[in-house]
Image (cartoon, rainbow, N blue to C red):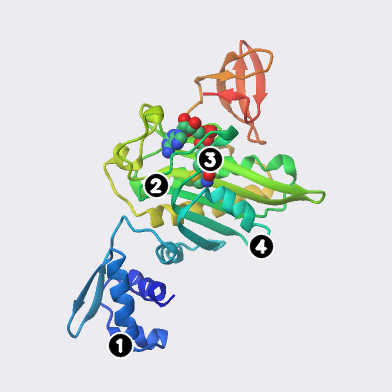
Amino acid sequence: MLKDEVLKILLSSGSHVSGQDISNKLGVSRTAVWKAVTALKNDGYDIESVNNKGYLLTKNKSILNEAEIETCMHLYDCKVFPKILYFNSIDSTNTYAKKAADLIPSDFLVVADTQTLGRGRLGRSWSSPSSTGIYMSLCIRPNISLEKASMITLITAMAICDAIEELYNISPLIKWPNDIVINSKKICGILTEMSCDMDGIKYIISGVGINVYDTEFPDDIKDTASSLLLETGTKTDRAKIISSAIYHFYEDLDTFMQTEDMSILKSKYESRLANIGREVMILDPKGEYPATALGIDETGALIVNANGKIKRIISGEVSV
Ligand code: BT5
């Protein structure tokens, strides 16, 4: 759409851009540029027009769309540039990504401003109000065996922490395996799903929900959830957080692929692990028992000390 192309030019320029420059660049008339600018203003963008200088866009932090994400992604030297599929509203970005994975052969990223049926693990739901959060699902196709897929959750968690640290100057922690917390409050959850056939993994979908600008939460989570805005007092572009997270994800995925396990990333992961040295509850079918988390091993399993016995815990067997 012409509107998106004009937006990309305005977003990537820090100063005024003349209507003539835009029309030359895009090979369209100045009237068409003017119409696109008017449409962007109607979308909520603040665009100043100055005679002899041109258009200047004042960044509106609350707007998220494909052009915003793509422009921001170009600022990062990403190893892989996934195709972006943006929706104002969707049932669940993970559900959509699963359907799209059979049609799109490359990596892709589904992003939505709101989800009507946001999903957590084990049939739980993910609160996904509009204009306040990031709801995204990255579809990748790494050539790894089935049992290694769960490590993608750990890599995703590290990438989200890296992005938050880079943009907010605060160090979030990971509650193994899939929660990210700041001041013990959950600000992000990860839902990793995959599909495989006789030849191995067809694709892995890493779904991420981040509370960015939320100032209130539904009753059932108001004591446990928080947002980046509430914890830091800072409002950062969602497109920037998304782009930074994708950049860091592919950096760490590259490292992971060297050994196809967590051996190189183990110490980095453990430096972000909230559970380390703390008590976790092991959900053994024969009966729950407490243990102290010691760290992870190269497979990404949580290593715990349960009454003097060292045990390996795999995902789904622990409550923290
Ligand atoms: C998760 O599950 O934490 C994974 C959440 C993944 C959400 C993303 S959004 C994009 C993509 N598309 C989807 O449909 N899903 C993914 P789990 O560990 O099961 O935690 C779920 C629990 O977290 C709920 O039962 C609530 O207690 C709590 N919760 C729900 N919404 C929350 C929110 N926005 N912030 C903090 N906690 C929340």
Q: Is residue 86 above or below residue 211?
A: below
Residue type, label 2: Gly
Query: Where is residue 18 shown, x and y percent of the image?
Result: 27, 83
Dot label at residue 119: 3
Nearest the camera: 274 or 212? Answer: 212
* Mark 2 Cα shell of 10 Å, populated few (<14), some (14-19), many (≥20): many
The number of numbered badges drawn on the structure is 4
Residue, disc 2: 133
Residue type, label 4: Leu
Residue type, label 1: Gln
Residue at horizontal 47 percent and vertical 51 percent from the top: 245
Residue, disc 4: 103
Residue, disc 1: 20
CA separation in Å, label 2 and label 4 = 27 Å
Element type at mark 1:
helix
Task: Of the two numbered discs 4 and 1 on the same chain, state the one appearing first in sequence.
Answer: 1
Query: Where is residue 306 shown, x and y percent of the image?
Result: 61, 14
* Mark 3 Cα shell of 10 Å, populated few (<14), some (14-19), many (≥20): many
User: CB of residue at label 2: within 8 Å of ligand 1?
Assistant: yes
Task: Of the two numbered discs 3 and 4 on the same chain, state the one appearing first in sequence.
Answer: 4
- Kindly indicate whether the residue at mark 1 contacts the one at mark 3 (C-beta within 8 angstroms): no
Nearest the camera: 300 or 26? Answer: 26
State whether residue 173 appears in this view: no
Query: Where is residue 26 shown, x and y percent of the image?
Result: 41, 84
Query: Where is residue 310 shown, x and y percent of the image?
Result: 65, 18
Residue type, label 3: Arg
